[in-house]
Amino acid sequence: MAIRRKTPVVGMAPAERARVPRSLAARRQRASEIYDILLAQHPTAHCELDHENPYQLTAATILSAQCTDKRVNMVTPALFEAYPHAAALSVAEPEHVEELIRTTGFFRSKTRSLIGMASAVVDRHGGEIPSTMDELVQLPGVGRKTANVVLGNAFGINEGVVVDTHVARISLRLGLTKEKDPVKIEQDLMKLFPKENWTMLSHLMIFHGRRICVARKPKCEVCPLVELCPSAFRV
Ligand code: SF4
């Protein structure tokens, strides 16, 4: 059986492991260092859901629940060709939408959300996806996370931080939060990082979580955050 190495890189004894400072000012300074390192590591981090407008991004984000972005990107071209705007999707036959999105999983409930979202957009917003958090979260199938994705990436509005499974895991490992609930994690991140960086922050963490700080066996040996991370070689 392979033995997992618990002691990190040479020169970093267990007693020297990274500590999270107590004061908010020091934690903000540390968060800023983490952000800069992640940005240097993943300078091209971006939303990996293919989209050309707010309608497409809203639909793609609904489809991304419990599904990879890669899989979503495989089904959305046909979906958007058949239903190029909310008005078209609002009158779609559910069976046809189900067939188009079947491989993304939970396709019946996602179809209900897509058609419900499109109908509400037509009824309440003249067919255009709204650009405020309050209006977005009133749409069927749209929660705070989806709304943050749409606001940040389709409208360029930093309203909050998208907390998905990668952001939640990395925030916990790096000691940026002690919470497990996404809404509470988001509140902690919003206190630590400047507002103008919130959208990019989630892209950086998602890129890092997919490539280095992966769920099961993080690649601490090649992670540029190793000296700031209290979880380095401990996961
Ligand atoms: S040092 Fe390891 S646990 Fe910490 S952020 Fe990097 S990969 Fe993740």
Image: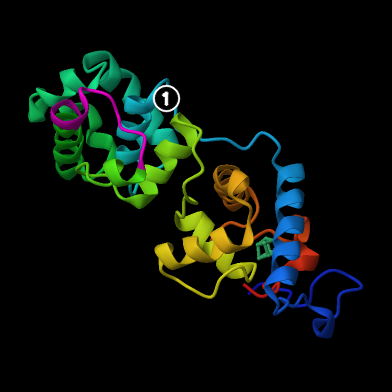
- The C terminus sits in image quarter: bottom right
Q: Who's the residue at 84% across and 68% down the image?
A: 9
Question: Percent from the top left, x then y, of residue 227?
Answer: 80, 66
Foreground of the two, 104 or 207: 207
Q: Is residue 98 visible?
A: no
Image vertical order of residue 102 relative to residue 96, above or below: below
Quarter of the image where one finds residue 191: bottom right
Residue neighbourhood size for the residue with mark 1, other residues' Cα within 10 Å, grouped as few (<14), some (14–19), many (≥20): many
Taking the image as shown, residue 190 lies to the left or right of residue 10, namely left
Q: Is residue 171 above or below residue 116?
A: below
Task: Note whether 122 is above or below 220 in the view shown.
Answer: above
Q: Is residue 97 left or right of residue 40?
A: left
In this view, the residue in front, 207 or 128, is 128
For label 1, the residue is: 51
Which residue shows up at 77% across the image and 75% down it?
18
Q: Nearer the viewer, residue 5 or 60?
A: 60
Above-or-below relation of 10 to 52? below
Please give the name of the residue rendered at 25% of the width and 43% of the height, measured from the top-left corner: 105
Q: Which residues are magenta?
A: 121-132
